[in-house]
Image (spheres, rainbow, N blue to C red):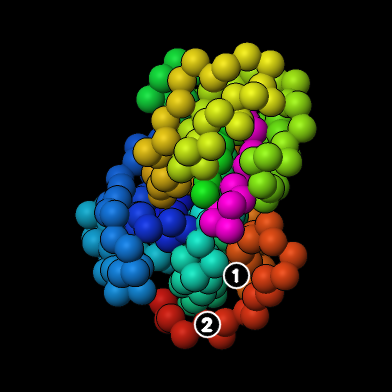
Amino acid sequence: MTAILSIDTSTPACSVALIKDGAVLEDFRMAPRQHNDLILPMVDQILSQANLTLSQLDAIAFGRGPGSFTGLRISAGVVQGLAYGADLPVVPVSTLAAMALEGGLETNHTSWLSALDARMGEIYLGGYELHQVEGRWVADETFPERVIKPDNLEPIKISYQGVGSGWVYKDELNSVLPQTAEKVIKSIAPRAACIAQLAEHLFHQGKTVDADQALPVYLRDEITWEKQPARIGKR
């Protein structure tokens, strides 16, 4: 049995999921500015629904970014506390890769250019190719993650479909692709169910970190992160 809890608070959406032997439970809510109040009760609810305790999990995964600075700090702090208290490894998962997986699960496309609105006229951008290994989802990075102004993009050699709020710059993004994206889904936000599915393969590949290394990835160099002391005991 492999059981992995995942959380994401990187956007106005707040979600918790649990994957156990390939089956996924998820609680997904659009809840701007409510992440602090909701996330731990949502964790308790998912664990209760699965009839599991933290100590029975194999790992905890989280959307490590990019995304909202405040949201990423919340998820990293919560994961550090939960993982430290239960002595569990952590699986950091790209929020952009999770969006690509959601796009792939909704369609029959496997190549996705994920874009999140980064404000200040910029977008977070990353390209991924989806496939499965031993029944587990993998999102291989084919266009390195970055934060960039859409007008500064250089031509991209790979054809992609588009996913995420950053595709509000559809004209600019399509102009640098070899061909116009056939499918664009702007409404998709990172969600814990997709993070959990990607985390399953990463866990079995040994791509985990200790609790104190569960850190956000902002993509902006000027942002710093201080590790939070673990304040959450075993459950």
Residue 226 percent location from the top left of the image:
65, 80
Q: Quadrant of the C terminus?
A: bottom left
Q: Main secondary structure of the magenta part?
A: strand
Foreground residue among 177 and 111: 177
- What span is colored magenta in the figure? 118-133
Q: Which residue is mark 1?
A: 211
Question: Pointer 2 and pointer 1: residues touching (CB < 8 Å)?
Answer: yes
Above or below — where is 49 with respect to 106? below
Label 1 residue SS: helix
Instruction: Using a 10 Å C-alpha cutoff, classify the residue at mark 2 as few (fewer than 14 neighbours), some (14 to 19) or many (20 or more).
Output: some
Answer yes or no: is residue 122 visible. Answer: yes
The label on residue 230 is 2
Q: Residue 122 in the image: state x and y as whole percent.
A: 61, 51
Residue in the picture at 65% in, 75% down: 225
Name which residue type carries label 1: Ala
Residue pictured at 55% horizontal, 40% vertical: 115
Q: Is residue 199 visible?
A: no
In-front residue for pair 9/149: 149
Mark earlier in primary sequence (2, 1): 1
